[in-house]
Image: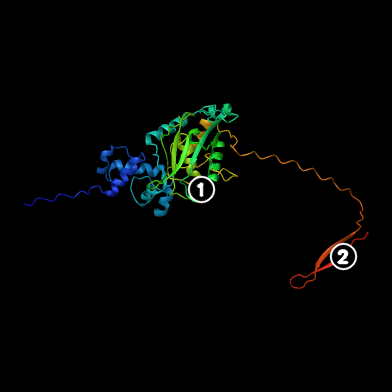
């Protein structure tokens, strides 16, 4: 009697390991590192992790529209839309776990808006910049940007991007001062060559716990050269997002893969307010920390008020006499409009 053949079971391959490693790195797969090579995309743990990134990253709908002509379904199945989503240019910081997202939602549900209403917020006052004449009454932080390795294109719009960062934060009550000495800065950014699809990264941020005694740093990829607005969003995301203590959000400026969020109405500047994030999370944190009341942008002079124009005296009714000569040039109608000089004599009626 012949022995029945054993059914072959497919073993996890390189593609499975790439997916598992990616999901583990960005906080969606909670298993020991040593178990990653054993996992397949068909395993329950992997499907749960795939479903997590499908539901969290708001660019999933865009990828699914390309491949399936519909919004993405967080079904845990790894296909071309999910593969594209995981390959998009993104921040190197991890995404919040399901437990962290639930805790944040619970926190916001019970958060009172007392701090925001006072215009003070929970961040330290005095502000971090000792040269601010109003340091004792408003929030400030100092940013240093090392652009020595930036490309020519990145340098061409860097100043405009920095202004956008300042405008975005000033709207929420935080003044961002640009300093030329890294030792003076609470936050710093440098341009580096980053491997893979990571376009920016921020080290050792701590949610909402940063003070004027910290010195936090991040990096921007020299290989990422979008238009100025998209690059501005990256700087806001890294330096004044993670640098202040924001986690990634589903949608908005803090979405893990960059989204092109709306500008503040009537301006060209980015805004946390109504940025499309789920629950408007980033703006709610900003108002909690900094009060949500707009402050001046450092280094930008306020617009001087326009002096009112004196009203023109009304011309009284009556008959008037115009005297004198008015010299005019009359076109004679020939091609090219040859001018003919003549005189128009105005005489009293």
**Disc sitting over residue 55 in the figure:** none
State the residue at coordinates (41%, 31%): 103
Earlier in the chain: of badge 1 and badge 2, it is: 1
Category of crowding for the residue at label 1, using alpha-carbon neighbours closer than 10 angstroms: few (below 14), some (14–19), many (at least 20): some
Between marks 1 and 2 in the image, the one whose residue lies nearer the viewer? 1
Q: Position of residue 43 (x, y in %)?
A: 27, 43
Q: Quadrant of the C terminus?
A: bottom right
State the residue at coordinates (27%, 41%): 36
Identify which residue, 245 or 182, lies in the foreground.
182
Label 1 element class? helix
Q: Is residue 41 left or right of residue 334?
A: left
Q: From mark 1 to mark 2, how far is it between C-alphas?
A: 60 Å
Identify which residue, 121 or 191, lies in the foreground.
191
Category of crowding for the residue at label 2, using alpha-carbon neighbours closer than 10 angstroms: few (below 14), some (14–19), many (at least 20): few
Label 2 element class? strand
The answer to whether any part of residue 328 appears in the image is yes
Decide: is 249 above or below 208.
below
Q: Position of residue 236 (x, y in %)?
A: 49, 41
The answer to whether any part of residue 41 appears in the image is no
Q: Is residue 53 left or right of residue 346?
A: left
Residue indicated by mark 2: 343
Q: Position of residue 13 (x, y in %)?
A: 26, 49
Q: Residue furthest left?
A: 1
Residue indicated by mark 1: 155
């Amino acid at each position: 009697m012949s022995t029945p053949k054993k059914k072959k079971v497919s073993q996890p391959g390189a593609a499975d390991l790439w997916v598992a490693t990616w999901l583990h790195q960005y906080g969606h797969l909670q298993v020991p590192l040593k178990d990653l090579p054993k996992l397949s995309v068909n395993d329950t743990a992997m499907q749960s992790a795939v479903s997590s990134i499908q539901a969290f990253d708001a660019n999933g709908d865009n990828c699914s529209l390309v491949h399936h002509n519909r919004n993405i379904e967080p079904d845990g199945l790894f296909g071309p839309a999910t593969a594209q989503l995981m390959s998009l240019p993104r921040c190197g910081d991890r995404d919040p776990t399901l437990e962290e997202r639930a805790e944040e939602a619970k926190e916001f549900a019970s958060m009172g808006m007392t701090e925001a209403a006072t215009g003070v917020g929970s961040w330290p006052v005095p502000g971090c910049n000792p040269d601010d004449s109003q340091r004792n009454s408003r929030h400030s932080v100092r940013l240093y940007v090392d652009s020595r390795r930036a490309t020519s294109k990145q340098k061409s719009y860097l100043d405009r991007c920095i202004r956008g960062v300042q405008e975005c934060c000033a709207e929420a009550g935080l003044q961002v001062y640009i300093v030329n000495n890294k030792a003076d800065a609470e936050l710093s950014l440098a341009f580096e060559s980053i491997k893979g699809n990571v376009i920016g990264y921020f080290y050792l941020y701590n949610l909402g716990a940063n003070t004027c005694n910290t010195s936090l740093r991040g990096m921007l990829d020299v290989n990422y050269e979008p238009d100025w607005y998209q690059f501005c969003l990256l700087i806001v995301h890294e330096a004044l997002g993670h640098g202040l203590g924001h986690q990634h959000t589903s949608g908005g400026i803090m979405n893990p893969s960059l989204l092109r969020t709306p500008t503040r109405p009537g301006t060209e500047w980015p805004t946390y307010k109504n940025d499309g994030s789920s629950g408007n999370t980033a703006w709610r944190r900003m108002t909690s920390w900094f009060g949500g009341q707009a402050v001046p942008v450092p280094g930008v002079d306020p617009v001087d008020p326009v002096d009112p124009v004196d009203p023109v005296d009304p011309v009284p009714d009556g008959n008037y006499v115009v005297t004198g000569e008015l010299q005019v040039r009359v076109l004679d109608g020939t091609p090219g409009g040859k001018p003919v000089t003549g005189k128009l004599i105005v005489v009293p009626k």
